[in-house]
Every structure is written in structure tokens, then in C-alpha cells.
Image (cartoon, rainbow, N blue to C red):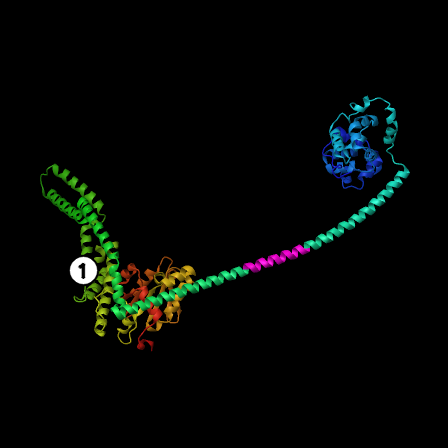
Amino acid sequence: MSEEATHIPDISEAAADWLAQTPSDQEVYDMLRETVFAEDIFSGQKMTVASAGRKIVRRRLKTALRRSPEVRALFLAADETPWAAWARCIAMFDEDWLKTHWRQLIRAVGNGNLIVALALDDRPSLRQRGKRLLLRTEFWDPSRQPWQNSPATPPPDWQTLTALLHCHKPSRDTTDRHDDTKDKLQRQAGALQKEVEKLHRALNKQKEKNDTLQDRHTKALTAHADEKQQLRQQLRRFQQQNEHLRSDVQEQVEARMNEFRRAVLGVTPAVQRMQEALRSRETDSLMERARITLDAHRKLNEKYGTVTDLEDEIRSLQATLDDITECLAQSVKVLPEIYDVRADILERLGELQGLVPQSRDLPKRELARRIHRMIDEASLENQGTDTLQALGKDMDEGPLSSLLTDKEKTDIGDALQEKEAKLRALKKAALLATSAPEKPHHAPNIPMAIWDVNQALEQLPSGSKPWLFVDGYNVVKRIPELNKLSQQVSLAQARQALCELCQAQTRHFERMEIVFDGKGALSNREALGDLTIVFSAELAESQNADNYIVQRTKGIQSEADIVWLVTADRGLQQRASLYADGFMSPADFYLFLKQGPNHDHLRH
């Protein structure tokens, strides 16, 4: 019987009951004792032949036959069952003959053994008939079995066949033959087991071979990937070298063109930068925007008035209100209308004072305005420094402090500090002008624009060295080489390249500080030889490089004779103009760093 034949999909409850009750106790015991299902079926019972006949064991066997395909397959295919002999007998009959006479055979046999034998047959047509009958009920119900209606005596030509089929109990000879067959099957099973083991060994060898090939393939792929990565890195290096070569060639071409302009056309770098500035339309654009904005604002002033007009009207209303109050105080008889007029004036005065928040105390505002005017008019010629010092002392200790608001005192204090710093810068510029007559004249309190760093260093008085402050990230962004380095490699690499160039030229300056925004790998102030590197956010969380540079240049006025600043930020230049003596662009500064000084006395 094939494996498929032993797996009956489903059987009816009546068929399961017949299958569980038909075998003898010995047959049930022999079938189940060596199986894994015996423990469940004999649960709570001692596994003996007598226990196999108990009702609870047969009920459990019936339930297992219906629910478990494994139990059903094992039970139906056992050699100890009554239907096993029938299965061997019908295997000798022709399939076509059985397909024609299977119904007569079932009636002649008079029980369900032949049906089970058909369900276990290897031939599909017979097996399907047996499975269908196992699903039905009337063949297994004693009150409805169809073979009970058949004649008591089968036809004469079937008597021998019927007798043969009823002899399902094997004789001793048959048992011996079965033992021989069993031994033979065991030997075949042993041979098959050896063959299976041989196949397993061959399979394991093939797996090992496949694993070896897989390892080789993986190593080859890894080597290929590494080689590909190396080629990519090599290509990247070649591209970088190519970019550097192109940049160097471009710089050489530009340098030779500049030399040609200077030699043939007399175009110096200063004249060239002036031409570029003149060709730029940025100033014209700003002037046009300013003109349009001023025109629009003048129209608004014509329509709504100005603060000055508003203050004049408030003063007029206040004077009229004072006159009315004085008149009321002196009059014996008062017109009733004057109270209405006074109330209207007060209402109008309140509306206007609401438009100008600080207009309620006009005398104090006028005092603050006069103090600001006094500060603006202070100069070196009229002993402005002494005037400012006296004014500051009066602000701290005199009566002025009680006449001004806190905001006015703060504004006046800031104005005093800025004016004092401006006067100190003018005084220092005057001293530099007298000590170095060969230095080009610059307007007082206006820092000079340093285009040629070498020339500016040569014109300094003997023994004087400037303090130099560098707006770090502004220089990195304005220099093409450093900007490209920050974009293609990292900002830290560009920052390091700038610091290395600056460190090579620190001997020409009294102090050199490079200030970067944010935070860096170094501490807030790190000295590398004569160079100081500052990260502004390390000093104060909200501080940027511009604020640090302005505060630093302002704070060293008493120490430094000359202060230079490298930046292209116009806002920073304007804020530091009171404290710095000269500005240079990142391009001029970078040219100085790359070429170095061209005068011998600075090198010693």
C-alpha cells in the first residue's frame, strides 16, 4: 500500500465506531503498544490486553480515529487488523473486474472489512470508492447495513471466493511466512538505511563543497568591493590634484596678467581695485533705493505730519492750558464756556501725548536732547575730553541724575563712552601722523583702507607693530581656495589651513587673534605660539564673533598703538570704526599670507 493510501482524509462517526469496536482486544493492544499514541489512549489505564477491551479505551480510540489523521493512518495500515488480509486478497484481483463487481463482493462478504481494504488499495479508482464509503453512515450502522438485504447464500461461483475471503486469520505457516517476509523487509530496510546514510554522507560532502565555493565567492566579492573602493579613492585624489593644479595654473595666469598690467599699462593693484569698485553698480543701486524710500517717507510726513510738528502742537496746547489755569485762578467771575474749552484741550493733549510716549515730560526730553548735542559738539580743539569727563561725573553724582529717566541716562552713558573712544582715536591718529609724516594722510576718525599690507607695514614708525584681528569665517567664505576646501572636505580643515597661514606671519604683528563664531574643538581662547584663536560662543552663549571683536578692540585702546581688522563685513567695519585704525579685505590679507612680506627689515 502506498503512503497516500494509508492517509484517509475523514471518516464518518459510524465508521469510526465500527473500526474501534471490530478488532479484538489482542489486536488493539498489538497495534497501539509500540506507538506514540498509546499513552493518550490508555491514559489512566494499565496498558494490557484486558485494558484494550474496556469501553473508555475504545471510546478514546474512536475519537482519535476521527480527529487524528496520524492515528487513523497507523491503525488502518497495521498488519494485525481484520481487514489487512482482505487488502492483500483484493490486491490480486484485476482493477477493471473489481470496478465492476465491488458492490457484489461487499454484499457477499457481509461486513466493512472489504470497504476498508478498498480505501487502503494502491489503485486510485478503488481507493476513492473506499474513502467515499468510509464517509457514509448506512454501511456502518447495524440497522441500515445494505448487505443485510442481500441473499443469505451467495451465487455458487462465488462460494469459494467467499470462503477464501472469510479466512482472514493467518495460519501458523502463514505466520512463519510473515516472519520470513518481516526478516526480509528488515534486511531490505537495513540496506535502505545504509543507502540513506550513504546519500546523507554524499549530501554533506556536497554541502561542504558548496560552502567552500560560497566562501570563495564571498571573498572574491569582498576583494572586488575593496578594489573598487580603492579605485574610487584614487580617482578622488586625482580629481583633487587636478583641481589644485587648475587652481594653481589659474593663479599663475592671473598673477602674470597683473604683472603685465602693472608693467605695460601702469595698473597697480590699488588702481585695479578702485576700477572694480567703480564698475560695481552696488552704490548706484543703494542710492536709488534710498532716494525712492526718502520720497515715499516725505509723502507720508506731508500727509500725517512729523514728531516735531506733534511736539510743537503739544507745547502750544500746554501753554494755552497754563494760561487758562492762571486765568481761572485770578478771575472773580468765570465764563461757563471756559470749562468746556479746558476739557477739550485736556482731551486733545491726552490724544497727542499718547502718540508720542515720552512727550508727557517735555522739559526733561529737552534737557536730554541738549546733553546729546553737547556730547556731539565735543572735540579736541575745545577741550572736549575734559567736558565729557565733567559731564560723566555730574551724571553719576550731580543733580542731572535725578532729572533724567533711566533710559535717557543709559543712552547718554553709551554716547559718552562712544565719544570718549572716538576722541582717543583722533588723538592717537594725530600722534601717528606727527611721528610718521611719510604715512599717507587719512581723515581723522576714519580708519584707513589697507590695500597693500607690505606697504602699510613699511610706513609704520620704527618699532611699532599693529594688533591684528581676523574675522575668521568671513575670510574663509571670501577666499575661493578656503571656501572650496570647506565645502569639499570640511569647515574644520579650511579653518586649520587659515590658522597655519596666519601663524607663519605672526612675527610682523604685536598680537594676532583669529575670531570664529560658535564653538570649536579648542577652548574659548587657545594660544598657538604668537597666534590666539578664539571661539566666541565659548565665552558667552549668545555672543558672536562681531560682538567679541568690537568689545576686544574697544577694550585694548590703552594697550595698543595701532589696531587693524581683516573683514569684508560692512556692518562690523562700521561698528569697529571708532576703535580700529585700518581695515583690510580678506583678498588683500590672503595675498599677503601667501606671498609673505617683501621687505627685509621685517624679516629680522
Instruction: Write the residue at 90% across / 38% down.
Output: 172
Quadrant holding the C terminus: bottom left
- Look at label 1 and name its amino acid: Met
Secondary element at image label 1: helix
211 in magenta: yes
Query: Which secondary structure type mostly characterizes the magenta part of the structure?
Result: helix
Please indicate, yes or no, whether residue 257 appears anywhere in the rendered image: yes
Look at the image and give the residue range highlighted in magenta: 208-225
Q: Nearer the viewer, residue 406 or 166?
A: 166
Q: Quadrant of residue 413?
A: bottom left
Please indicate, yes or no, whether residue 51 appears anywhere in the rendered image: no
Q: Is residue 350 above or below residue 519?
A: above
Q: Nearer the viewer, residue 185 or 326?
A: 185
The residue pinned by badge 1 equals 374
**Position of residue 347 in the picture relative to residue 67 (left or right):** left
Instruction: Write the residue at 77% across / 50% down.
Output: 195
410 in magenta: no
**Position of residue 184 in the picture relative to residue 515 (left or right):** right
**Position of residue 172 in the picture relative to residue 197 (left or right):** right
Quadrant holding the N terminus: top right
Q: Is residue 512 above or below residue 28?
A: below
The percent position of residue 130, horizontal first and vertical second, equals 76, 31
